[in-house]
Image (cartoon, grey):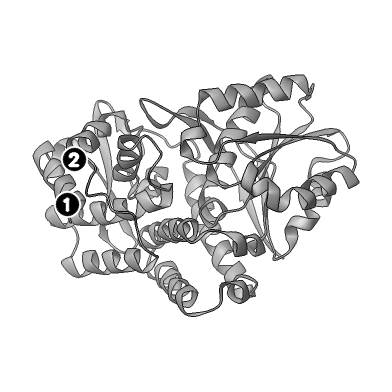
Amino acid sequence: MKIVRIETIQQASKYDVRIESGLIGGAGKLIRKSLGRDAQKAVVVSNKKVFSLYSEAVVSGLRRNGFETSIHLIGDGERYKNFASLNKILEHLAVSSLARTDVVVGLGGGVVGDIAGFAASVYLRGVQFVQIPTTLLSMIDSSVGGKTGINTLFGKNLIGSFYQPSLVVIDPKVLETLPKREFTAGLCEAVKHGAISGQPLFQETVSIIDDLSNAEHSKLLQTKGFESFLARHIVFKADIVKHDELESSRKTNAKSRKILNFGHTFAHALEKATKYRYLRHGEAVGYGIIFAAELSKKLGLLDAKVVNLLRDVVHRCGDLPSIKDIDPETVHGSFKFDKKNTGGSLQWVLLRRIGQPVIVPHEKIGDELVRQTVKEIISA
């Protein structure tokens, strides 16, 4: 078993991310060991599709280990990460008489993890929370770091909290049932990590992308090499989070948590412009990487060869849905709702080279150049 220990300074918390093929069957035992005997009740938050695949393993495991367990299902997709879904989860927690020593278990991808974690953070001002991510993107990114939240008409993840889980349980074997689009989305997020981390993680990510296109998924996913790949991505993100847990508005160097938003400003604008119904989050990030790379080139920060490399690697992740019918002005208008807006200025995460992200205020770029690049990427 791969174990990554996550430590946070400001919230003074520590928790393990445990990674092993077949681990989901032992999740109940791990949760009991992690939380102790004071935890009596567990509410599993999931969606219908994921729950149909893994409920037996998770719920029966929790009950075998002494948890009084109930289930709450939400809709599948970003558009269900909203106030209405949050309110229903909170009502379920209240009806279940969940105590502060009890636990909310998020079983699913990033949407489930984000909203279940947010509900856990605000119910009774905080009950324990465990993540069991079932998508590649949630395994390497959203399940780690403590960001929780919901989407609104004003933008993505503008309502939320920083709330660390007590445990993250990752079973790579569950990815065998992951739809191709979700795999593509997760790989795009992995490319983002590699681009801002440096050549070692970037090259390993490219290698995994190529292996997945040439090998049988089920065999690759159960190898120690794939477990190590997941662990290295998690270690990278955990190191960034440790030094800037709450994403300080004052921190603008390469150790700022903001660098994890490379590709995300354009991605979030695309998602908002399409009402969170058209693109998977990782697909939008794929386009966001290309956008940020192109903008970096226009500013003289990034060599054209690296831009072409990133574009090529993103497309090797899988087919991305066309964005040619999306209105560029709607996308451009969505930037003002981005949560990286500081002191009235949007902070763009760009790139000087692989492994060297840089944060550039919007006024140093100019609105016209941003608008022009939006039109170019959408019409490409």
* Residue 21, x across and y down, in percent: 70, 66
Q: Quadrant of residue 342?
A: top left
Q: Relative to 363, is 105 on the left or the right?
A: right
At x 32%, y 33%, the residue is 338
| Quarter location, residue 76 | top right
Residue that appears at 47% across and 80% down: 214
The amino acid type of the residue labelled 2 equals Pro
Front position in the image: 52 or 289: 52
Q: Who is closer to the viewer here, 6 or 101?
A: 101
Q: Secondary structure at mark 1?
A: helix
Label at residue 379? 1
Classify mark 2: residues with Cα within 10 Å, few (<14), some (14-19) or many (20+).
many
| Residue located 80% across and 41% down the image | 35
Total marks shown come to 2
| Residue 305 percent coordinates (x, y) | 20, 70
Residue at screen point 18% across, 56% down? 380
Residue 328, label in figure: 2
Q: Quadrant of the N terminus?
A: bottom right
Q: Is 324 placed left or right of 204 in the picture?
A: left
Q: Are marks 1 and 2 in contact (CB under 8 Å)?
A: yes
Does residue 363 appear in the picture of this structure? yes
Check the image and name the residue furthest to the left.
Answer: 368
Side of 54 relative to 241 (left or right): right
Indicate whether 37 appears above or below 122: below
* Mark-to-mark CA distance, 1 and 2: 9 Å
Foreground: 327 or 251? 327
Q: Secondary structure at mark 2?
A: helix
Q: Callout 1, which amino acid?
A: Ser
Whether residue 365 is visible here, answered yes or no, is no
